[in-house]
């Protein structure tokens, strides 16, 4: 009989614990409301400014406006790691719920005349289902023009610059620091810490961060982005990062 990873493993089972918090914790919901309430306050300030281009908000999708925690639960409880195949099986269902506060905020922004651009690292093959999911909840600007998916690179910088050519980006929303600046992409843990400290004034101002304990570059940097390693190898590296007493 094939044995799975030990139940003490951080990978893959730990992600289910993170998803449980996201699904059942009122504190998670409160943090999301806090983020979007802050975004609303900032938006009201920004739209009073003069501009020579239309205002725009750039937002990530997954764990920023759409909740994918059921996928994490499904794979973790089966002892599976993320894979493009299982992920795209999930997104094809267009079954994501909304992140608390996201829909009302983006509708409010649209009512203020601010366009919304969705920059996501979902693949081009996921375009139809992604639009279907956004349109299911009546997110504003849920159309091909405003949906920028991953092409050859997972970096979002080129796509942000593309939007900036025609629009004045007043705010960026995301759950991963790479959603805000190329300075955070594929950096070591130490460098991410330094860059985060240096950008402190932007958080809660131009950068609005949503909580995501399930996955992201925070995890990738701890294994030096060596996703090709086995789960047991990654698990061993992660356990060495824990602080005990």
Image: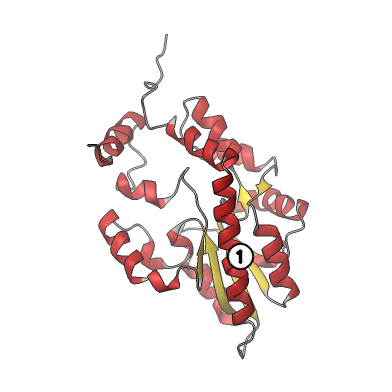
Label 1, on which residue? 37
Above or below, 213 against 150 in this view is: above
The residue that appears at 55% across and 48% down in the rendered structure is 28
User: Of 95 and 85, which appears nearest the observer?
Assistant: 95
Q: Which of the colour schemes (rainbow, by chain, secondary structure, one colour) is used?
A: secondary structure
Q: Quadrant of residue 181?
A: bottom left
Residue 21: x %, y % from top left: 52, 39
Q: Which element carries disc 1, helix, strand or loop?
A: helix
| Observer able to see residue 119 | no
Above or below, 185 against 211 in this view is: below
Q: Quadrant of residue 173?
A: bottom right
Q: Quadrant of residue 200?
A: bottom left
User: Of 43 and 58, which appears nearest the observer?
Assistant: 43
Above or below, 14 against 38 in this view is: above
User: Of 245 and 227, which appears nearest the observer?
Assistant: 245
Q: How many marks?
A: 1
Quarter of the image containing the N terminus?
A: top left
Quarter of the image containing the C terminus?
A: top left
User: Of 211 and 122, which appears nearest the observer?
Assistant: 211
The residue that appears at 51% across and 74% down in the rendered structure is 161
Residue 202: x %, y % from top left: 44, 72
Q: Tell me: 15 left or right of 6.
A: right
| Observer able to see residue 212 | yes
Residue 10: x %, y % from top left: 37, 32
- Give neighbour class at mark 1: few <14, some 14-19, many 20+ (Cα, 10 Å): some
Residue lying at the far left of the rendered structure: 245
Q: Tell me: 28 left or right of 225.
A: right
Residue 30: x %, y % from top left: 58, 52
The residue that appears at 32% across and 33% down in the rendered structure is 235
The residue that appears at 29% across and 54% down in the rendered structure is 189
Q: Tell me: 73 left or right of 111.
A: left
């Amino acid at each position: 009989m094939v044995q799975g990873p030990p139940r003490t493993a951080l990978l893959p089972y730990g992600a289910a614990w993170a998803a449980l918090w996201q699904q059942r914790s009122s504190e998670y919901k409160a943090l999301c409301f806090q983020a979007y309430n802050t975004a609303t306050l900032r938006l009201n300030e920004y739209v009073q400014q003069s501009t020579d281009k239309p205002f725009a908000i750039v937002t990530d999708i997954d764990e920023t406006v759409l909740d994918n925690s059921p996928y994490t639960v499904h794979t973790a409880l089966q002892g599976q790691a993320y894979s493009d195949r299982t992920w795209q099986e999930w997104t094809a269902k267009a079954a994501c719920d909304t992140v608390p506060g996201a829909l009302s905020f983006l509708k409010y922004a649209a009512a203020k005349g601010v366009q919304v651009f969705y920059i996501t690292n979902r693949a081009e093959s996921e375009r139809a289902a992604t639009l279907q999911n956004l349109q299911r909840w009546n997110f504003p600007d849920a159309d091909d023009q405003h949906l920028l998916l991953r092409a050859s690179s997972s970096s979002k910088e080129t796509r942000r610059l593309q939007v900036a050519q025609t629009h004045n980006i007043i705010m960026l929303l995301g759950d991963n620091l790479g959603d805000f600046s190329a300075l955070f992409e594929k950096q070591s843990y130490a460098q991410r810490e330094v860059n985060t400290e240096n950008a402190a004034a932007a958080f809660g101002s131009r950068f609005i961060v949503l909580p995501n304990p399930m996955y992201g570059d925070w995890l990738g940097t701890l294994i030096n982005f060596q996703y090709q390693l086995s789960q047991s190898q990654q698990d061993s590296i992660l356990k060495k990062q824990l602080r005990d007493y």
